[in-house]
Amino acid sequence: MVTIADVAKQAGVSKGTVSSVFSKKRPISAEVTERVLNVAKELNYVPNHAARSLATKKNMIIGLKMPTLDTELSSFDLKVINGVVKKCTEIGYRVLLDRVYDGEDTALFSRDPVDGVILLNPKEQDPRIVQYKQLNLPYVLIGRPNNEDVETKYVDNNNIEIVKEVGEFLIESGHKDILFLNASYGMTVAEDRKEGFRRAFENFGLHFLEENVIYNDQEKYKNGSDYGFYTLIETVKEKKYTAIIADTDRVALGVLRAARELGMDIPNDLSLVALSNNETLALETTPQLTSIELFPEKLGEEAAEILINVLNDQLAPRHKMIPAKLVVRDSCRKTHLIR
Amino acid sequence: MVTIADVAKQAGVSKGTVSSVFSKKRPISAEVTERVLNVAKELNYVPNHAARSLATKKNMIIGLKMPTLDTELSSFDLKVINGVVKKCTEIGYRVLLDRVYDGEDTALFSRDPVDGVILLNPKEQDPRIVQYKQLNLPYVLIGRPNNEDVETKYVDNNNIEIVKEVGEFLIESGHKDILFLNASYGMTVAEDRKEGFRRAFENFGLHFLEENVIYNDQEKYKNGSDYGFYTLIETVKEKKYTAIIADTDRVALGVLRAARELGMDIPNDLSLVALSNNETLALETTPQLTSIELFPEKLGEEAAEILINVLNDQLAPRHKMIPAKLVVRDSCRKTHLIR
DNA sequence: TTTTATTATTAAACCGGTTTAATAATAGTT
DNA sequence: AACTATTATTAAACCGGTTTAATAATAAAA
């Protein structure tokens, strides 16, 4: 393998000069610069990453921490990955993809070769955040942190506002009995969405019922589809809802499945909104799913940009809010039920 | 930041002894071992990755090269990523996710900090392969290389056999006019599939027509769905097919869409098979899609295992074949057309 | 007790790049 | 021509860990 010493020797200059040619941090004559670059090209010299990282104390790598290995990644996650990788690649950073291996013993492993970390789907009281603070490792969350955490930087959708908008859209369509199949309890996104849902009812002077908000129990349901399916099957025995807001489009698909089994027609008997927008799914279901576009790729890009600005001692906002958008398709209709 | 020198000083031993405690490559007394481990824990010592990589000449990182940034990643890709990350994490390797940035000028960038590379969706005459050979960088392909390349290691499905099976399944169901919406021209998977398709016809003593095999023109269609949609709209003007084999489930969805527009019923008027298995899509379409399970996660795992075995100078097979599986659902039926 | 073999530990070189303080070369001013 | 300022380049230290050759300590055999 060609090292900087080989290039220096053949070009007849010092290692330091070769280094300065590449870094452009010191004045090097045009003649020497040209000679060095020609030799480097001729020898096919490629700088050693570890050596450079060790000397500069920078890895130029971003860690992207994904959910635990036992949960399946969604198209949302995929788009976030896309956004992060895209922005990092533009700026000259690399992305180390990491899934947390629960119970892992990292005592003997080297520190992650990353300069900062983007955390997707952080848990409440996420122990990794404590660790990053301890190590002084810069990090950015995708999703809102706890209210007590006033320093963590994050990127998020306007979850309160968008669910308020969805709630109002349904209320304005005549729906009053709306079932909200929320995310898991304890996630900040679940809190925000519930708040938005409550505000929609409040805004119309309607009575908000806690029991209309269900939280996904991930130990009970192996996937979102089952959560949607079984929850509708169960709740229809107790109360007749005319509209459902589903946490994800997979949950919505489960609802569609249950509705078919129950002989309920979407949207005639039951209106349906999904709080995510897997376009392929939405456009290909019958009827086409009304959903929320969360712009996950944008979330990833903005998170990467914030983190990199922090790493380069540049101004970075505390948080960035990406407005979600209601995409009305065919799964909702006005209800005739007047009460 | 705590270094090995700090640990050595406080434990009253040399840096080399601390290193040997962790590596277990030299005999260290139990008493010294315990003392060192206690100090390391007390000081919260975490080895520096770059330093270790430089000294050992190993990064313990695998590069996963994905398709170019301008193409959208599919759920197949996601599962491959999952499989690779899972296997690597088990064995103590990390995964650097890389998307090729066309036209990138890497002259001033350090060499990828990876020990080996997994290449997903390699092109014909992929220039990266030339480069890896030049650098003596171990690599494994996911997908078959060109026939002239006799040394590249790869993982692949049994594409010839599975498409032969699909073809025979359709022929046995009475279909003779079968349209095959193949992958892009020039991809080895497209070659293999066509060969499998041809063999199915040959096996039944039927005449195989080249014009029944269409190749995806990615410059013409912005996504698989459009490829499926417009191709069916166009070809139905010239010939009446009773069955279609679609490259991916997205292509199949486009076909479904076109069939709806043309007033054709699936499967009564047209049978449909997708050569991939996005389970969510397949189960939620109406009718449920008959498809091929490719086991992408397994592809990823096996590719990672082969590569890591190569890196550890262990026996590794030239290639590993993952048998795909025909999953019969509701989108196919016997045809009554007897000719 | 002495000698030999085995185990345990060390100092220093090494990995390949960057940076710093020092020096040399060149250009401009007096 | 001599002096000063600026530009260009160098040798060596440094980054933090691993490895090697050498040495010290301990155990076993004669």
Image (tube, coloured by chain):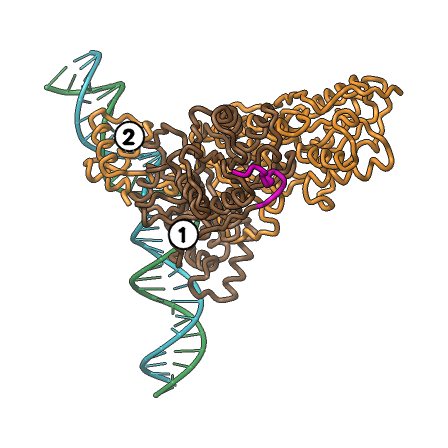
Chain colours: A orange, B brown, C cyan, D green
Q: Identify which residue, B274 or A228, lies in the foreground.
A: B274
Task: Estimate the spatial distance between the alpha carbons at disc 1 and disc 2, rounded to whole Å.
Answer: 44 Å
Q: Position of residue B211 (x, y in %)?
A: 41, 32
**Residue depicted at 58% across the width and 30% down the height:** B256
Q: Position of residue D29 (x, y in %)?
A: 38, 85
User: Is disc 1 in the same subunit as disc 2?
Assistant: no
Which residue is labeled 2 in the image? A21
Q: Identify which residue, B97 or A331, lies in the foreground.
A: A331
Q: Is residue A7 above or below residue B51?
A: above
* Boundaries of the magenta span: B327-339
Q: Identify which residue, B215 or A126, lies in the foreground.
A: B215
Q: Is residue A186 visible?
A: no
Task: Say which quarter of the image contains residue A135.
Answer: top right
Which residue is labeled 1 in the image? B319
In terms of secondary structure, what is the magenta stretch mainly?
loop
Q: Chain of mark 2?
A: A
Q: Chain of mark 1?
A: B
**Residue depicted at 74% across the width and 35% down the height:** A260
Instruction: Check residue B52 in the rendering and tell me which mark sits there, or answer none.
Output: none
**Amino acid of disc 1:** His
